[in-house]
Every structure is written in C-alpha cells, then in structure tokens.
Amino acid sequence: MSQPFELPEFYTPYPARCNPYLERARAHSKSWAYDMDMIDVPVDGTAIWTEDDFDAHDYALLCAYTHPDATADDLDLVTDWYVWVFYFDDHFLQCYKRGGDLDGARAYLDRLAEFMPLADRAGDAPEPTNPVEAGLAQLWSRTVPAHSPDWRARFAESTRNLLNESLWELANINEARVANPIEYVEMRRKVGGAPWSANLVEHAASAEVPAPIAALRPMRVLRDCFADSVHLRNDLFSYQREVAEEGELANSVLVIERFLGCSTQTAAELVNDLLTSRLHQFEHTALTEIAPLLVEHGIDPAAATGVGRYVKGLQDWQAGGHEWHMASSRYMNTHTTPGPALSGPTGVGTAGARIAASIAATMPQRVRRFTHVPFQPVGAVAHPEMYMPFGVRLSPHLSGARARNIDWSHRMGILAEGVWDERRLRAIDLPLCAAGIHPEATPDQLDITSGWLSWGTYGDDYYPMVFGTTRNIAAAKAQNTRLATFMPVEADDPGWTAATTAVPLNGLERSLADLWARTAAPMSVPAREQFRQAIADMIESWIWELTNQTHHRIPDPIDYIEMRRATFGSDLTMTLSRLSHPATVPETAYRSRAVAAMQNAAQDYACMINDVFSYQKEIQFEGGIHNCVLVVQNFLDCGPEEGMQVVGELMNARMHQFEHVIAVDLPAMFDTLHLDEPARVTLRGYAAQLENWLSGILHWHQGCHRYAEADLLANTQHAHPRPQPPAWPVRPTGLGTSAARLEPLRPAGDRVRQTLGRRPEPERVRPSALMMADGPGVRDTVRLGR
C-alpha cells in the first residue's frame, strides 16, 4: 500500500542518543513478554503478537532512545512498561474495538483499576486472568514502592486515563464520529498516554517533581506540551496503519482533514506545524517560567537539580521518540519529504547533524510569534455565522439591577480610579448579561451576578492599564497576593462579614471583599475553598496575559484555548453553578469525562464569541495579542477574514459537541455510574443552566456597547493618544539572521485559503429529549472582560 502522504519536515532540536544497555533490554523484554503470555498466545483464536511482530516493533529501541541515561535496571523496567502499554493497545483493539463491545470494554477497564493500589497492600489485588492484568500487577509492584504518595497518585491517574479513555475512542468508532480539533487534543492527551510517559521519565531520571509545584501551570504546561508533541508526532507516523488499516478515527491528521475539508497532505503539514508550535511552547516555558517558579516556592537546590533532569528527560524522549518512529516497522516511515540540499545526512543515528537545518526550517514560525506589529488597522471584519440553538430569556428584574449596579459601583470606588466612569459602565451593561445567563434569579441574586461580572470585567481592564503599560509584573503579582487576603475561607461566626479581612486600598479590593462576603458567607469551608481557587486561577491568568504582552509573544494555539477559559472567568462561573446544586450528585459525576466535555465545550464557545466581537477593539485600538482570531492568523499565516472564518468553524464545532454530550454522553454516564433520579435531574438542570449561559452571553455581546466603542476610540484618539510601538521589522535583519528569514516551503496561509469554504456541514445531534427540566436556581456569574 502506498503512503497516503509524504511525511513533513519535522522540528528536531535535540540530538537522539541511545542507551548503552539496549541489547540487555531487548533480551529482557522479550523474556518478560513471553512470561506474561504476550507472544504467540492466541486471544479469541488470534495471537495479538508473534515473535516476529515483537522483534520488528523493537520497544527496547524506543526506550533506549527515549531514556538514554537510564541505568540497566531502570531501562529494563521502563521497557517492560512500554511492552505492556503497546500490548494493551493492540489487545483492546482485537478484543473490543473491532467488535464494538462497549459494555465488555467498560467491565474490562474497571477491573484493571484493581491492580493499581495506592498503598502497599500485598494480596489485595485479584488474580490476573489475562496478560494485561498480569503485566500491570507485576509492573506496579516493581515501580511504585520507590516513590512518594504524590507520585503514586499522579501515576495512577495517568495510567487510568490512558486505559479508560479508550472508551471514548471506541464510542466514536461505533458512532462513526470524528472529534473536533479542540476536543481531540484534549482527549488524546489522556488516551495517548504521554502524561504517563512523563511520570516514567521522573522514575528513570531519579527526578521526582516536588509535590508543591507538580500541579502548577509551568510544570503542567511542560507536561502537556510534551504529551501533545508525542501524540501529534505519533499520529503522523501511524495514520496509514490506524486510519487506512484499522478503521481508527482518533488521529489528528484525520481530524484536521475532516475539519478543514482539505487534502491529507495539507492536514499532515498543519499537524506538523502544531507539533512545532508545541515544542516552541515547551522551550519558552522551560526557559522563562521554571527558574522563577523554583525560587518562588523555595525549592531546595537538590530538588531543583532534579527538575532540571526531568526537563532534560522530556527533551530526550522527544528526540528519541522521533528516531524510533523512523526505524520501527510499526509505522509509516519508508520515505520523508526531501529537505534542503545542505540539510545533512539522514537515517538512524544522524539526528544531531539535522538539528541546524531543522531549526532553520521552522524559524519563520517562531519569529512570526514575536513580530506582530500592534495597533494595525484591521477594520470591521465580518463576523462568522454563529450556530446558537438556544433561545435567550431575560430576568424581569433587569431594569432595577441596572440602577443598583451603578450605585454599587460608585460605592465600591471602581468609577473613581481613571479606568471606568459611569458612562462606560452603562455602555458595557453587565446586568444585561446577568439577566440572560441567570433568567430566574431573584433581585438579590441578579445583583450579586451583576457585581461579579462588573468586578471581573473591571479587573480585566485595570491590570493592563495599571500594570501593563509599565510592564510591572511584580506589582501585578503583589496585587494578586493582596486580593487573596479578601477571600478568607475559615469563619466560625455565622455573621461573618467583610470586616474580618484586611483593609481594602482600592476599588478592586473593596468590591471583591464585598462580593466575597455576600457570596461565600453561606458556604461551607470546602465550598469556599473551591470557590476561592476558581477566582485565584482567574487572577493568575491575568499575570499570564501581562507576561505575554511584555514578551510581545502571541500565544501558542493550544495554550491560548486552555488559558482563555481562565482569563474569561469560565471556571469561576462553573464553580458557582455547581456549588448551588443540591447535594444529590456524587463528585465522581462532576469529574466524569461527560461533564468536563460539556463544560469545556461551552466555555470555548463563549470565549470565542468574545474574541469575535472584540477583535477590532483589541487588535486595532488596544494593541492586544490575546484574541483567538489573531492566534489563528499567526499560526496559519493567514489574513483576518480567514482567521475569523476558522474561529467561527471552531465555535460551531464546539456547540455541536456540546449538544452531542447532552444527548449521548450524559445519559451514558448516568447509566454507567448508576445515578439516581435526583442526581440526573440536577445534572440535566446544570446542562439547561449552561444553555442559558451560552445564549445570554451571545445576546449580551449583540446588545451591549462595549465593542461598538471601537468607533468611539477611532474618533477620540487625538484626545487620548495611545503609545506607539517601535517599528519592529517583521523579520530580523543583519549578519547572522538569514536562518530567521527563511520562508516556509509551503506557507500555511496558502494551504488554508485553498480549503476554506469547502468544509462539509458536521453531523450533529439535538438534545431535545434531555432538555425537559430546568435545574434549581443558581447564582451564575461570568467574567466577560474583553
């Protein structure tokens, strides 16, 4: 069978090195696989692997390349883990995917969790009944005793994810459904297993990430960039086997091919561009965020050195994984796109000689991210068609809420600091948004919702004006620290008020103290902690925006989508909604894939609504860089019209997914978790609340004057001149900068322009059967800061 596309030219910035204990690992892993009955043992009449299959795949070579500095014993153990995980993948395909046996797969995966105890409890696990169970039980006992409880919990979670999310792949196969690009990256990160690989990097490098920083943004971004790069690379090499031979639908090349309606070759090149972008994000985070993180959290020198080994281990994995894909018979690798004449030697073991050519070929993409010229006139770009299946309902208390919000804003002082005045607040009309996202609110509830909207939107304007113009990130972080003092979680006095906190010094602090007291006082301490964390995540994301603005760096697309949920205040909204639910829903339901997918799809749609409406205001009049349309423009190297069209397609794809989750995934989750009727009613009500949230946000954008103010700004720039940026060149010039001026072989913008407008209408499911009950009243809030 001929290759469906030519492999693109990959970004390979790190040299691949091979562990000297390769041959020992080859012998050991084959012996271990035979002991576990993984080779030449029939399953339902068919052997998953023959010895020839095992030798050709050469998992020991993979591990020798990806862990070049591991000891002999650690290389043996890590290789056994990879033998196990690849066997699991092929075993699951043979036993469950080919036949579409969703119920059998679910029971099989549930049982595997019993072989991963977090504590040392010998004899608690059941007797293994197949090679996957036997291998997992033995490997678990050989690995986890050497690690802390924190590492065990993280490793167990990543292992469960790569096992359990296979059900998502199987469900999509049964429905003949191809995921949208955002959903795919999100789910591939779990089912693909690279976060699990990152845990094994910690083991092999003897560099356990310190618990205080393991879940923080810089470490999370490193892990996620690593995971996405591993998976996107694998998808390029495995497309032929997975899509053409196995009928697999979980492959990023196929996802892009279907989403854009483009050729397989174009889709492969765009996937490779995204892979490059994720590696650039990895490098940026490692170089700019890790050292400050270690200092800020007081990580001792020994642990800090371990973090350095961990980062290096992730880089080694990227280099070695690519080299193995080029050699393994498991993948499509017979020939690649010819490189420049001076690109150097090719073949196994020549990665180091290819680094310079690789960096030069991808330099235009890196440079483009830092060379956007702000305040460019973009005009009024036509909005895309936005699919909105839900009608809007407004609270009857809107008129009173408007007047009370003006009065409250005056009392809090947020109209007296030079950022907002009453005219501006009236034009923004945040009570209109509150009335749409919370149509059944009482007057008091609507006032609180309007207050949170006002506080978050004011903060979004306040931080760039007060801290962004001076690039004073330290002062912004100090403000965040002070804001935290106005959100106490411990209060024994039932009459707890804002008087128990510090003394506010500005309108932002005063309004937060007031809102916190009115909103959090009735909550339990755990609920307050959850609510406080949602607010902390939002204000921390403002620092991320300021830092990018200081670096003059347009974000990586995936990093932007995931951080936009926080900058928009979406997590805060969802937290408040859930905290108001009756105690009928188990936490496992809220942590389920279905609920997470429903929330994320809604958040992304709402965030992109805001970016579409605010594009001219932000890009032309504010010199901003945090807008999805601009991020797409920069990534695809295309114009505003094409960028706007792609964002519209992403919005609609997320809305179709939102409907699909409600119609298909939620009912399946109800049955899987055996939820009772009160819990089902609550979650159906939650879905209805999100429908109100989505339609209310769109209605507010269409009805407020926050974005029409672009016309006002254009007419008043003589009165309030904005600082003009230096005349940065679009490409660097001078001796030694030729590599940075190299043009891509095939500009992404040209590829996209050839395909836009030819995309098929996606198949969708309407959730009318589930939309039969509204949930309980809830104090919904959201920050619409753009």
Image (spheres, helix red, strand yellow):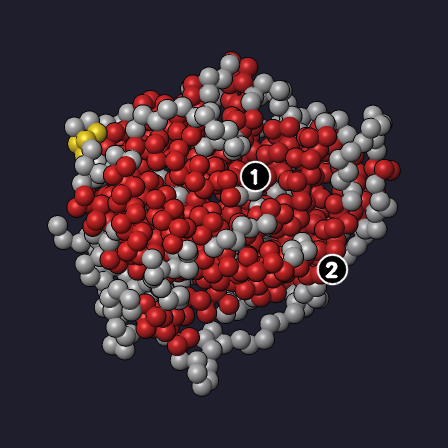
Numbered label attached to residue 475? 2
On the image, which quarter does residue 649 sit in?
top left
Q: Nearer the viewer, residue 759 or 288?
A: 288
Q: Is residue 236 visible?
A: no
Circle on res. 356: none
Q: Could you tell which of marks 2 and 1 lies nearer the N-terminus?
A: 1
Q: Report helix, strand or loop for mark 1.
A: helix
Q: Amino acid at mark 2?
A: Ala
Q: Residue at 31%, 25% (x, y): give it.
A: 129
Mark 1 neighbour density, 10 Å: few (under 14) some (14–19) many (20 or more)? some
| Residue 297 in sight here | yes
Secondary structure beneath dot 2 equals helix
Looking at the rendered structure, the kind of residue marked 1 is Pro
Q: Quadrant of residue 409?
A: top right
Q: Is residue 308 above or below residue 572?
A: below
Measured from the top left, where is residue 307 in percent x and y? 55, 57
Q: Position of residue 406 (x, y in %)?
A: 77, 41
Few, some or many residues within 10 Å of mark 2 (<14, 14–19, 20+) = some
Q: Which mark is residue 149?
A: 1
